[in-house]
Amino acid sequence: MTDAPRPSHRDFDPGLMRLFDQYVHGQIDRRAFLAGAARFAVGGTTAAGLLAALSPKFVQARQVAEDDARLATRYETIPSPAGYGEARGYLAAPAGAGGPLPLVLVVHENRGLNPHIEDVTRRLALEGYLAFAPDALFPLGGYPGDEDSARSKFQELDQARTREDLLAAAAWLQSHPLGNGRMGVVGFCYGGAIANFLATRLPDLKAAAPFYGSAPPVDAVPAITAELLVVLAEDDPRVNASWPAYEEALKAAGKSYTLLQPPGTQHGFHNDTTPRYDEAAAKQAWTATLALFARTLR
């Protein structure tokens, strides 16, 4: 991981960051973002330059090398019950581990299994987990190598079928011969919403850490048995709008949950490949996530 300073969201106008959030989540396209960003381009900076500054820098942010000798990693193909034929994901484990290992399912954002999520999966493996990150885009050819194409492809998915594949990925991981049968899930943005969804569908799930993910339907909350760590950003109106009703339902059903909402953060603050990253808040949330998993999965 490079020590070179990287731009922070505090270096950019809040209006530009809101515009970028709309772009990231497919509410506007690249052309609309560039048109809107033009009004923030000053001092020789161009709209295209602002987009480049805000876009992910996977190599610079990588924390664990792909060939780290401490790990064993590979892509695994599993049956798809949703009619796609096959599903695929990235599996990481401590090198030479004979098991049984605690299990963590890692669910990506709305761009598929990109290098950042693979890096997060390796980080978990270094902590002693058998970690598996399914790729929702695999039926459409997998992560295409750039974020724009990935976002466009993601909108082509049949989400009902995709959720069936994610449920199958969870079942595959939970029954893995290296695992101890105790599984948690962590997800980011879209993956945070999936983590909430899986918590309502998997009665044996021990823990879920949804990072800035939309809430599940409140009538599904009574089915949750996992302990939850709900991670939200402070400035994230779209996602945060669903939290009050979700929290009320969790309280009414007597569920075990913790809310972590670091001040001054924006949606995506854990993702260290973009300027939305907040180092202190990301470390706080990750430490809390690891503590949750250590308590419930080992």
Image (cartoon, rainbow, N blue to C red):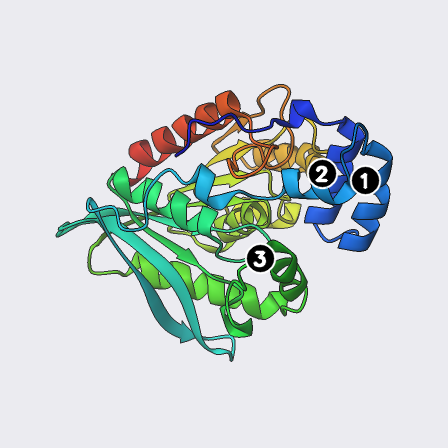
User: x and y percent of residue 4 in the render?
Assistant: 47, 27
Q: 213 above or below 162? A: above
Residue farthest to the front? 44
Q: What's the CA distance linking mark 1 and mark 2?
A: 7 Å
Please, what secondary structure does the residue beneath circle 1 have?
helix
Choose top left, top right, bottom left or bottom right for residue 162: bottom right
User: x and y percent of residue 139 in the render?
Assistant: 52, 73
Mark 3 or mark 1: name the one nearer the start of the chain.
Answer: 1
Q: What's the CA distance linking mark 3 and mark 2?
A: 17 Å
Callout 1 amino acid:
Ala
Query: In this orientation, which residue lies closer to the viewer: 259 or 97?
Result: 97
Q: Mark 1 — residue? A: 37
Image label count: 3
Choose top left, top right, bottom left or bottom right for residue 76: bottom left
Q: Mark 3 — residue? A: 146
Q: Residues within 10 Å of mark 3 (few under 14, many from 20)?
A: few
Residue 29, visible in the rendered structure: no
Identity of the residue drawn at 33% across and 58% down:
173
Mark 3 or mark 2: name the one nearer the start of the chain.
Answer: 2
Q: Residues within 10 Å of mark 1 (few under 14, many from 20)?
A: many
Q: 291 above or below 154? A: above
Which image quadrant: the N terminus? top left
Q: Mark 2 — residue? A: 50
Identity of the residue drawn at 81% across and 54% down:
31
